[in-house]
Amino acid sequence: MSQTRKEEFKVNGEELLGKVKQLINEGNVRRIIIKNKDGKQLVEFPLTIGVVGAVLAPVLAAVGAIAALVTECTIVVEREVNEKEK
């Protein structure tokens, strides 16, 4: 049985796209939420196992657009955690 846990990362706009790509490549991420510096949710991306290439292109384009508009933001990551990792 697997559960989820949340982590938060504070990044500036320049680092946003790179951090999101890194998180997606880790593979155990179920959802990514990007919030502005005031805590308002800007966008949420649910990720499923096996998401690759062309499917991610629109997501990464949207993240790039957000990065151009914000100076600081928070990335909330929901990860799948196996019983062994608890």
Image (spheres, helix red, strand yellow):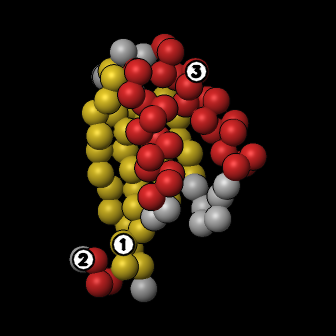
Name the image quarter holding the N terminus: bottom left
Task: Name the residue tied to disc 3.
Answer: 65
Frontmost residue, 85 versus 36? 85
Which residue is the extreme one toward the left? 86
Residue 73 in the image: state x and y as whole percent.
Answer: 35, 27
Alpha-carbon span between mark 2 and mark 1: 7 Å
Alpha-carbon span between mark 1 and mark 3: 30 Å
**Amino acid type, mark 1:** Val
- Give the label on residue 81, or none: 1
Callouts 2 and 1 close, C-beta under 8 Å: yes
Task: Name the residue tied to disc 2.
Answer: 86
Residue at the image point whose x is 48% and y is 32% from the top: 17
Residue 59 in the image: state x and y as whole percent.
Answer: 63, 38
For residue 31, above or below residue 50:
above
Determine which quarter of the picture holds residue 81. bottom left
Residue at the image point whose x is 46% and y is 41% from the top: 20
How dense is the environment of label 2, judged by Cα within 10 Å: few (below 14), some, or many (20 and up)?
A: few
